[in-house]
Every structure is written in structure tokens, then in C-alpha cells.
């Protein structure tokens, strides 16, 4: 029987390189259609932390604008105390958009759950991807979980951000923006804690 010997330094180099190569393959960012599917499932499962991670910063800022508008007209402290789970007035302007949107979604689920029913009670199926320059348009079908519901075909746009695909535009983003702006606020005067909410919008 013939035997072969491999110099120890070369063997160690192979052992070190192979795991790194495998790790690089595992770390490859998911393609647009996978991100789109995860985005849709984030609404369906109400997994807000995972959902906001798949939203492009431009879209997060757009949703945050709706929250800022609601803050400006709230004179009761409802947004800070209830919708944002007891967020301090001094903390709000410093909150990253991703965290502000996550807290808002959790608060809407807790305080006004019916507001998100059109996004959470449906099935979705990705149909295909269309490339346009640096962007990717994902075509998908939605079906509300209601008797007599008719399937709808929609499109969301994804752009790269820090090497990963994220949802930059979708009807769900616009629906969420509108829904947040329309959250009914309780009537009342100044917040119980004595701190007005007006003017807390970020500069």
C-alpha cells in the first residue's frame, strides 16, 4: 500500500482555508425573492424585529414620518406611553428609525390590532423577479384570508443597502404609513407626566 505524506504547514493551511470558504458561502446575503418572502411573512407572523431588518432605511424613514406627525398632534401622551411602550420623551428623538418602527408595530398590535389586519391575515406567494438597473422588482400574489377574497398581484422594489437586499417600496409600506397617521388618539389635555409631546419630532 502506498502512503502519502503532506507537510504539516500545508495541512494546517488547508484546514484553515476550507472553513473560511464554507463560512463565506453560508454568509452570502439572500436574494431579493427570499427577502421579499421574509418581508411578507414578517407581517403574517407579526415578527416585527425581523420585519424591520428587511426594510430599506428610506422606507423606514418614510414610516417614521407618519409617527412624527402623530406625535405632533398627540396632547395626551398616548403615543409615548401606550403606542411606544413607555418611551421617554428625551429618548424618542434619538431612537433609530428601525427601533421606532419596531416599537410602533408592537404597539399597534397591542393597542389597535385591527389596524394591521389587512397585512397580517393573508397568504402571499412570490411569482418572479424583474431587474431594473440596481433595483429588483419582486412580483407576488396576495390572498386575504376572507371568504370570497380575490387574489391580487402586486410588486415591491428592493435595493441594496450595505450589501444586502432590502424592501424600499411596497404597497404594504404605504399602507402602514397611512394607518399610523390615522391611529385614533384619545381626547384629553396634557399628558399625565406633565410633558407635552408637541415638538418632539426629530430635527
Image (cartoon, grey):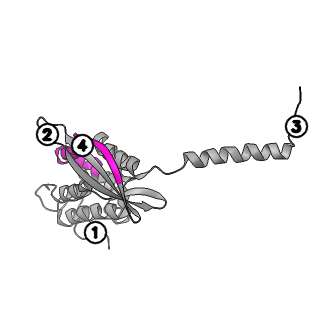
Task: State which mark lies toward you, 1 or 4.
Answer: 4
Q: Which residues are magenta?
A: 105-129
Q: Is residue 8 left or right of residue 199?
A: right
Residue tagged by mark 3? 5
* Disc 1: which residue: 201
Residue 202 visible in the displayed image? yes
Q: Quadrant of residue 89?
A: bottom left
Q: Secondary structure at mark 1?
A: loop
Instruction: Give the residue at the far front of this rendering.
Output: 1
Secondary element under disc 4, as helix, strand or loop, is: helix
Residue 188 in the image, given as x and y percentages of width and height: 11, 58
Q: Quadrant of the C terminus?
A: bottom left
Instruction: Please tell me whether mark 1 or mark 3 is closer to you in this view.
Output: 3
List the residue tagged with mark 4.
Answer: 120
Q: Does residue 185 appear to the left or right of 167 in the view shown?
A: left
* Residue beneath disc 2: 149
Q: Residues within 10 Å of mark 3 (few under 14, many from 20)?
A: few
Amino acid at each position: 500500500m502506498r502512503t502519502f505524506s503532506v507537510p504539516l504547514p500545508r495541512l494546517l493551511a488547508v484546514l484553515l482555508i476550507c472553513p473560511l470558504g464554507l463560512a463565506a458561502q453560508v454568509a452570502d446575503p439572500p436574494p431579493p425573492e427570499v427577502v421579499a418572502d421574509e418581508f411578507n411573512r414578517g407581517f403574517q407572523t407579526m415578527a416585527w424585529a425581523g420585519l424591520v431588518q428587511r426594510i430599506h432605511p428610506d422606507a423606514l424613514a418614510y414610516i417614521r414620518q407618519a409617527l412624527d406627525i402623530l406625535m405632533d398632534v398627540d396632547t395626551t401622551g398616548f403615543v409615548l406611553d401606550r403606542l411606544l411602550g413607555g418611551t421617554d420623551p428625551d429618548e424618542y428623538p434619538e431612537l433609530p428609525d428601525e427601533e421606532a418602527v419596531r416599537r410602533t408595530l408592537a404597539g399597534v398590535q397591542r393597542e389597535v390590532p385591527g389596524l394591521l389586519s389587512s397585512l397580517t391575515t393573508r397568504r402571499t406567494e412570490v411569482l418572479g423577479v424583474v431587474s431594473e438597473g440596481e433595483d429588483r422588482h419582486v412580483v407576488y400574489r396576495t390572498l386575504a384570508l376572507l371568504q370570497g377574497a380575490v387574489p391580487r398581484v402586486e410588486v415591491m422594489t428592493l435595493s441594496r443597502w450595505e450589501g444586502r437586499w432590502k424592501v424600499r417600496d411596497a404597497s404594504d409600506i404605504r399602507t402602514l404609513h397611512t394607518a399610523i397617521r390615522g391611529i385614533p388618539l384619545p381626547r384629553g389635555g396634557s399628558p399625565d407626566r406633565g410633558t407635552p409631546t408637541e415638538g418632539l419630532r426629530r430635527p
